[in-house]
């Protein structure tokens, strides 16, 4: 059971043994704290609850204060075959959870882009620039059409873009810095700098 909470720092480039360059993202994980171990007998399922970051006591709910003054808290469920060797109050670091070569699943909130048209939001080509067309270069075109007399559900239109939870699979750990508690992941990770990122190991 591999997991950790981190923040996105910046993107960089790394070189492999053959000299090929790959894009990579640096994630900074301040030591995570195990706040609670949930069991089948007591809670009905098995999971590990983790706290991350620091926050003023006045900004933390009273129910959460006994567990710690954390900015974020997440929960990771365990399979029946997985044994949890951690205890409440234990500290989790990057070198304890991950090693170079591990495949991970990364989740985070993507950048918010506000209200956008169909060209940027869905990749529409827009209308033609000739044959009598005017002011039609980025319009969505027909939204009803045929004999429907209504707009079908799921029609791609202009609207709010970004700011959603995105999960990226099949990323690889290419570097672990135990001193700075950083992970280097090959590929792109959703969000801006400072975005909370959930890193989970691939089961099996």
Image (cartoon, rainbow, N blue to C red):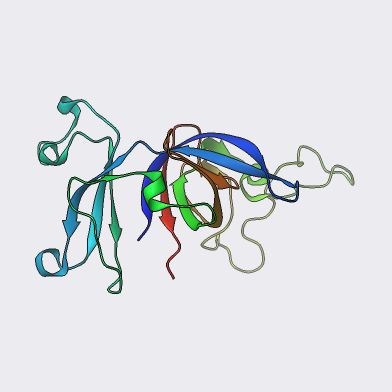
**Image quadrant where one finds the C terminus:** bottom left
In the picture as drawn, the residue positioned furthest to the bottom comes out as 81
In the picture as drawn, the residue positioned furthest to the right comes out as 131
In this picture, residue 87 sits left or right of residue 141: left
Q: Could you tell me if residue 194 is visible in this image?
A: yes
* Residue 41 % position (x, y): 11, 69
Q: Is residue 199 above or below residue 204?
A: above
Residue placed at 83% from the left, 47% from the top?
A: 128
Residue placed at 61% from the left, 46% from the top?
A: 121
Residue placed at 75% from the left, 49% from the top?
A: 125
In this picture, residue 58 sits left or right of residue 172: left
Residue nearer the viewer, 193 or 113: 193
* Residue 22 % position (x, y): 68, 45
User: Residue 203 falls in which quadrant of the image?
Assistant: bottom left
Q: Is residue 56 above or below residue 69?
A: above
* Residue 150 % position (x, y): 55, 61
How many numbered circles does the render carry? Answer: 0
Residue nearer the viewer, 186 or 141: 186
* Residue 191 % position (x, y): 50, 39
In this picture, residue 37 sits left or right of residue 176: left
Residue nearer the viewer, 138 or 146: 138
Q: Is residue 195 above or below residue 98?
A: above
């Amino acid at each position: 059971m591999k997991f950790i909470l981190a923040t996105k720092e910046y993107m960089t480039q790394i070189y492999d043994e053959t000299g090929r360059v790959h894009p990579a993202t640096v994630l900074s994980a301040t030591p995570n704290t195990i706040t609670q171990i949930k069991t089948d007998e007591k809670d009905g399922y098995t999971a590990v609850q983790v706290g991350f970051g620091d926050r003023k006591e006045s900004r933390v709910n009273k129910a959460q204060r006994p567990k710690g003054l954390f900015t974020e808290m997440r929960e990771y469920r365990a399979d029946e075959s997985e044994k949890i060797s951690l205890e409440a109050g234990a500290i989790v670091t990057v070198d304890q959870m991950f090693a170079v070569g591990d495949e991970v699943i990364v989740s985070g909130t993507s950048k918010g882009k506000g209200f956008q048209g169909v060209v940027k939001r869905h990749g529409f080509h827009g209308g033609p620039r000739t044959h009598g067309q005017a002011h039609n270069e980025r319009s969505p075109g027909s939204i009803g059409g045929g004999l429907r007399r209504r707009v079908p559900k799921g029609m791609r239109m202009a609207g709010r873009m970004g700011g959603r939870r995105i999960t990226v699979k099949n990323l690889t750990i290419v570097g672990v810095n135990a001193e700075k508690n950083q992970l280097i992941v090959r590929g792109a990770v959703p969000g801006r700098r400072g975005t909370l990122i959930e890193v989970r190991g691939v089961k099996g």
